Image (spheres, rainbow, N blue to C red):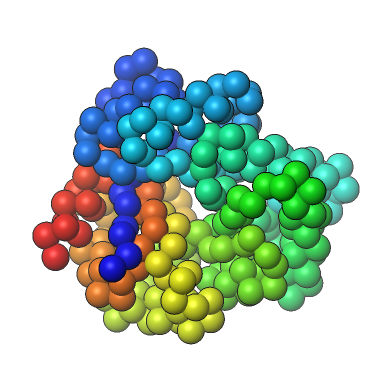
Amino acid sequence: MATLLFGTAGIPQSTWPQETGEGIRRVAALGLDCMEIEFVHGVYLDEANAKAMAGIARNNKVKLSVHAPYFLNFNARELPKLHSSQGTLHKAARIARLCGAESVVFHPGFYLGNPPGQVYETIKTSLEGVLDKLKSDDNPITLRPESSGKPTQFGTIDEITRLSLDLPNIAPCIDLAHWHARGGGNNSYEECSGLLAGLKKDLGEAALKEMHIHLSGIEYGKNGEKKHLPLRSSDLEYEQLLRALKEHGAGGTLICESPNREEDALLLKETYQKM
Protein backbone atom coordinates (compact mmCIF):
# COMPACT_ATOMS: atom_id res chain seq x y z
CA MET A 1 0.00 0.00 0.00
CA ALA A 2 1.25 3.48 -0.90
CA THR A 3 2.33 5.75 1.94
CA LEU A 4 1.01 9.30 2.25
CA LEU A 5 3.38 11.66 4.08
CA PHE A 6 2.18 14.80 5.88
CA GLY A 7 4.09 18.02 6.41
CA THR A 8 4.23 21.79 6.28
CA ALA A 9 4.58 24.45 3.61
CA GLY A 10 7.67 26.14 4.95
CA ILE A 11 9.25 26.27 8.39
CA PRO A 12 6.81 25.41 11.21
CA GLN A 13 5.73 28.50 13.12
CA SER A 14 6.87 26.99 16.42
CA THR A 15 10.47 26.78 15.16
CA TRP A 16 13.11 28.94 16.80
CA PRO A 17 15.17 30.35 15.29
CA GLN A 18 13.20 30.56 12.04
CA GLU A 19 15.81 28.85 9.89
CA THR A 20 15.36 26.11 7.32
CA GLY A 21 17.55 23.55 9.08
CA GLU A 22 15.79 24.12 12.39
CA GLY A 23 12.48 23.86 10.56
CA ILE A 24 13.39 20.41 9.27
CA ARG A 25 14.32 19.31 12.79
CA ARG A 26 11.08 20.76 14.16
CA VAL A 27 9.01 18.88 11.56
CA ALA A 28 10.57 15.63 12.77
CA ALA A 29 10.07 16.54 16.44
CA LEU A 30 6.38 17.21 15.80
CA GLY A 31 5.95 13.75 14.30
CA LEU A 32 5.43 15.02 10.75
CA ASP A 33 7.10 13.51 7.70
CA CYS A 34 7.96 16.19 5.15
CA MET A 35 8.52 19.89 4.52
CA GLU A 36 8.25 22.06 1.44
CA ILE A 37 11.01 24.68 1.32
CA GLU A 38 9.32 27.91 0.25
CA PHE A 39 11.34 30.04 -2.17
CA VAL A 40 8.48 32.56 -2.25
CA HIS A 41 10.46 35.69 -3.13
CA GLY A 42 13.64 34.06 -4.42
CA VAL A 43 15.96 31.08 -4.13
CA TYR A 44 17.60 31.92 -0.81
CA LEU A 45 19.84 28.86 -0.33
CA ASP A 46 23.27 28.61 -1.93
CA GLU A 47 24.86 25.29 -2.91
CA ALA A 48 26.68 24.73 0.39
CA ASN A 49 23.57 25.42 2.48
CA ALA A 50 21.43 23.27 0.20
CA LYS A 51 23.77 20.31 0.73
CA ALA A 52 23.60 20.93 4.48
CA MET A 53 19.78 20.82 4.32
CA ALA A 54 19.99 17.46 2.55
CA GLY A 55 22.06 16.08 5.43
CA ILE A 56 19.70 17.42 8.09
CA ALA A 57 16.68 16.01 6.27
CA ARG A 58 18.34 12.63 5.84
CA ASN A 59 19.36 12.46 9.51
CA ASN A 60 15.84 13.38 10.63
CA LYS A 61 14.03 11.21 8.07
CA VAL A 62 12.17 14.21 6.62
CA LYS A 63 11.31 14.28 2.93
CA LEU A 64 11.91 17.65 1.28
CA SER A 65 10.29 19.35 -1.69
CA VAL A 66 10.64 22.92 -2.95
CA HIS A 67 8.20 25.60 -4.08
CA ALA A 68 9.72 27.88 -6.73
CA PRO A 69 9.24 31.67 -6.44
CA TYR A 70 5.69 32.89 -7.00
CA PHE A 71 6.47 35.50 -9.66
CA LEU A 72 7.06 33.02 -12.51
CA ASN A 73 4.96 33.42 -15.66
CA PHE A 74 5.67 31.15 -18.59
CA ASN A 75 3.09 33.03 -20.65
CA ALA A 76 4.77 36.42 -20.15
CA ARG A 77 4.47 38.75 -23.15
CA GLU A 78 7.89 40.31 -22.56
CA LEU A 79 10.79 38.05 -23.48
CA PRO A 80 12.99 39.24 -20.57
CA LYS A 81 10.25 38.19 -18.10
CA LEU A 82 9.86 34.85 -19.83
CA HIS A 83 13.61 34.20 -19.80
CA SER A 84 13.78 35.28 -16.15
CA SER A 85 11.04 32.76 -15.28
CA GLN A 86 12.94 30.00 -17.06
CA GLY A 87 16.19 30.90 -15.32
CA THR A 88 14.56 31.10 -11.90
CA LEU A 89 12.83 27.72 -12.23
CA HIS A 90 16.09 26.17 -13.44
CA LYS A 91 17.93 27.60 -10.43
CA ALA A 92 15.22 26.43 -8.02
CA ALA A 93 15.44 22.94 -9.51
CA ARG A 94 19.24 22.89 -9.21
CA ILE A 95 19.17 23.94 -5.54
CA ALA A 96 16.26 21.61 -4.82
CA ARG A 97 18.25 18.66 -6.12
CA LEU A 98 21.17 19.60 -3.87
CA CYS A 99 18.70 19.66 -0.95
CA GLY A 100 17.79 16.08 -1.76
CA ALA A 101 14.32 17.11 -2.97
CA GLU A 102 12.62 15.13 -5.72
CA SER A 103 10.01 17.74 -6.72
CA VAL A 104 9.77 21.47 -7.46
CA VAL A 105 6.29 22.99 -7.38
CA PHE A 106 5.64 26.13 -9.45
CA HIS A 107 2.84 28.35 -10.72
CA PRO A 108 2.89 28.13 -14.52
CA GLY A 109 1.43 31.55 -15.38
CA PHE A 110 -1.59 33.64 -16.31
CA TYR A 111 -3.86 33.63 -19.36
CA LEU A 112 -3.50 37.42 -19.83
CA GLY A 113 -6.62 37.41 -22.00
CA ASN A 114 -5.23 34.89 -24.47
CA PRO A 115 -7.14 31.74 -25.53
CA PRO A 116 -6.37 28.82 -23.19
CA GLY A 117 -5.18 26.62 -26.05
CA GLN A 118 -2.68 29.23 -27.17
CA VAL A 119 -1.49 29.75 -23.60
CA TYR A 120 -1.01 26.01 -23.21
CA GLU A 121 1.32 25.86 -26.21
CA THR A 122 3.30 28.91 -25.03
CA ILE A 123 3.78 27.48 -21.54
CA LYS A 124 4.65 24.06 -22.92
CA THR A 125 7.34 25.54 -25.19
CA SER A 126 8.72 27.64 -22.34
CA LEU A 127 8.98 24.61 -20.07
CA GLU A 128 10.71 22.58 -22.77
CA GLY A 129 13.57 25.06 -22.56
CA VAL A 130 13.92 24.49 -18.80
CA LEU A 131 13.69 20.71 -19.20
CA ASP A 132 16.43 20.77 -21.84
CA LYS A 133 18.74 22.59 -19.41
CA LEU A 134 17.95 20.15 -16.61
CA LYS A 135 18.66 17.24 -18.92
CA SER A 136 22.04 18.72 -19.82
CA ASP A 137 22.70 19.12 -16.07
CA ASP A 138 21.80 15.44 -15.56
CA ASN A 139 19.17 16.64 -13.07
CA PRO A 140 16.21 14.19 -12.97
CA ILE A 141 14.08 16.31 -10.61
CA THR A 142 10.33 16.41 -11.26
CA LEU A 143 8.78 19.79 -12.07
CA ARG A 144 5.24 20.04 -10.72
CA PRO A 145 2.87 22.70 -12.12
CA GLU A 146 0.33 23.52 -9.43
CA SER A 147 -3.41 23.55 -9.99
CA SER A 148 -4.50 27.16 -9.66
CA GLY A 149 -7.13 28.84 -7.51
CA LYS A 150 -8.26 31.64 -9.84
CA PRO A 151 -9.85 31.48 -13.30
CA THR A 152 -7.32 34.07 -14.53
CA GLN A 153 -4.47 31.64 -13.79
CA PHE A 154 -3.40 28.81 -16.04
CA GLY A 155 -3.65 25.53 -14.17
CA THR A 156 -6.87 23.57 -14.39
CA ILE A 157 -6.54 19.90 -13.50
CA ASP A 158 -6.88 19.08 -17.21
CA GLU A 159 -4.13 21.53 -18.18
CA ILE A 160 -1.56 20.28 -15.70
CA THR A 161 -2.46 16.67 -16.50
CA ARG A 162 -1.92 17.37 -20.20
CA LEU A 163 1.48 18.94 -19.49
CA SER A 164 2.38 15.82 -17.53
CA LEU A 165 1.46 13.65 -20.52
CA ASP A 166 3.20 15.83 -23.12
CA LEU A 167 6.50 16.55 -21.34
CA PRO A 168 9.07 14.38 -19.54
CA ASN A 169 9.75 14.87 -15.81
CA ILE A 170 6.52 16.83 -15.35
CA ALA A 171 3.88 15.69 -12.85
CA PRO A 172 0.94 17.51 -11.23
CA CYS A 173 0.82 19.29 -7.92
CA ILE A 174 -2.84 18.89 -6.96
CA ASP A 175 -3.90 21.76 -4.72
CA LEU A 176 -7.24 20.58 -3.37
CA ALA A 177 -8.01 23.97 -1.80
CA HIS A 178 -7.42 25.74 -5.13
CA TRP A 179 -9.53 23.11 -6.89
CA HIS A 180 -12.36 23.92 -4.47
CA ALA A 181 -11.90 27.70 -4.71
CA ARG A 182 -12.25 27.90 -8.51
CA GLY A 183 -15.98 27.39 -8.26
CA GLY A 184 -16.99 26.48 -4.74
CA GLY A 185 -17.66 22.83 -5.63
CA ASN A 186 -15.13 20.01 -5.61
CA ASN A 187 -15.55 19.53 -1.88
CA SER A 188 -16.90 16.00 -1.43
CA TYR A 189 -15.77 12.39 -1.30
CA GLU A 190 -17.49 11.69 -4.61
CA GLU A 191 -15.85 14.62 -6.41
CA CYS A 192 -12.39 13.82 -5.06
CA SER A 193 -12.88 10.16 -5.98
CA GLY A 194 -13.68 11.25 -9.52
CA LEU A 195 -10.55 13.41 -9.63
CA LEU A 196 -8.35 10.52 -8.46
CA ALA A 197 -9.95 8.07 -10.86
CA GLY A 198 -9.29 10.51 -13.70
CA LEU A 199 -5.66 10.96 -12.73
CA LYS A 200 -5.21 7.19 -12.58
CA LYS A 201 -6.83 6.77 -16.00
CA ASP A 202 -4.77 9.54 -17.63
CA LEU A 203 -1.39 9.20 -15.91
CA GLY A 204 -1.39 5.62 -14.64
CA GLU A 205 -1.48 4.04 -11.21
CA ALA A 206 2.13 5.02 -10.48
CA ALA A 207 1.13 8.71 -10.59
CA LEU A 208 -1.49 8.05 -7.91
CA LYS A 209 1.14 6.43 -5.69
CA GLU A 210 3.52 9.40 -6.03
CA MET A 211 1.23 12.41 -5.69
CA HIS A 212 2.19 15.86 -4.45
CA ILE A 213 -0.83 17.49 -2.79
CA HIS A 214 -1.47 20.88 -1.21
CA LEU A 215 -4.30 21.25 1.27
CA SER A 216 -5.61 24.01 3.54
CA GLY A 217 -8.75 25.88 4.37
CA ILE A 218 -9.47 28.62 1.86
CA GLU A 219 -11.53 31.79 1.46
CA TYR A 220 -12.85 32.38 -2.04
CA GLY A 221 -15.33 34.40 -4.06
CA LYS A 222 -16.54 34.76 -7.63
CA ASN A 223 -12.95 35.36 -8.75
CA GLY A 224 -11.66 32.28 -6.97
CA GLU A 225 -9.05 32.10 -4.23
CA LYS A 226 -8.70 35.00 -1.77
CA LYS A 227 -6.53 33.60 1.02
CA HIS A 228 -5.71 30.45 2.94
CA LEU A 229 -7.58 29.75 6.18
CA PRO A 230 -7.20 27.29 9.07
CA LEU A 231 -9.10 24.11 8.21
CA ARG A 232 -11.66 24.50 10.98
CA SER A 233 -12.36 28.12 9.96
CA SER A 234 -13.27 27.14 6.41
CA ASP A 235 -15.93 25.17 4.54
CA LEU A 236 -13.42 22.63 3.22
CA GLU A 237 -14.64 19.09 3.83
CA TYR A 238 -11.14 17.83 4.53
CA GLU A 239 -12.28 14.57 6.11
CA GLN A 240 -14.13 13.58 2.94
CA LEU A 241 -11.13 14.49 0.78
CA LEU A 242 -8.80 12.47 3.02
CA ARG A 243 -11.16 9.49 2.89
CA ALA A 244 -11.09 9.57 -0.89
CA LEU A 245 -7.29 9.71 -0.88
CA LYS A 246 -7.09 6.75 1.48
CA GLU A 247 -9.65 4.58 -0.27
CA HIS A 248 -8.03 5.18 -3.67
CA GLY A 249 -4.62 4.23 -2.31
CA ALA A 250 -3.07 7.63 -2.99
CA GLY A 251 0.50 8.00 -1.81
CA GLY A 252 3.24 10.60 -1.90
CA THR A 253 3.36 13.94 -0.10
CA LEU A 254 0.60 16.09 1.38
CA ILE A 255 1.71 19.62 2.27
CA CYS A 256 -0.45 21.75 4.56
CA GLU A 257 -0.59 25.43 3.57
CA SER A 258 -2.90 26.64 6.35
CA PRO A 259 -1.87 29.75 8.31
CA ASN A 260 -1.48 27.45 11.36
CA ARG A 261 0.53 25.06 9.24
CA GLU A 262 1.85 22.52 11.75
CA GLU A 263 -1.38 22.40 13.77
CA ASP A 264 -3.42 21.60 10.67
CA ALA A 265 -0.77 19.26 9.25
CA LEU A 266 -1.02 17.23 12.46
CA LEU A 267 -4.82 17.38 12.33
CA LEU A 268 -4.73 16.00 8.78
CA LYS A 269 -2.29 13.24 9.66
CA GLU A 270 -4.18 12.18 12.77
CA THR A 271 -7.54 12.24 10.95
CA TYR A 272 -6.11 10.16 8.10
CA GLN A 273 -4.53 7.60 10.42
CA LYS A 274 -7.80 7.04 12.29
CA MET A 275 -9.66 6.14 9.08
Residue 200 lies, in percent from the top left, at 45, 79
- Any part of residue 180 in sight: no
Residue 11 lies, in percent from the top left, at 39, 31
Q: Give the quadrant of the N terminus.
A: bottom left
Q: Which residue is painted at 54% across and 50% down in the image?
A: 103
Residue 147 lies, in percent from the top left, at 52, 62
Q: Is residue 145 above or below residue 119?
A: above
- Residue sitting nearer the eye, 122 or 103: 103
Q: Which residue is painted at 59% across and 25% down in the image?
A: 45
- Any part of residue 265 in sight: yes
Find residue 33 and report its image quarter: top left
Find residue 189 and report its image quarter: bottom left
- Residue sitting nearer the eye, 193 or 260: 193
Residue 137 lies, in percent from the top left, at 75, 44
- Residue sitting nearer the eye, 210 or 80: 210
Classify residue 114 as left or right of residue 158.
right
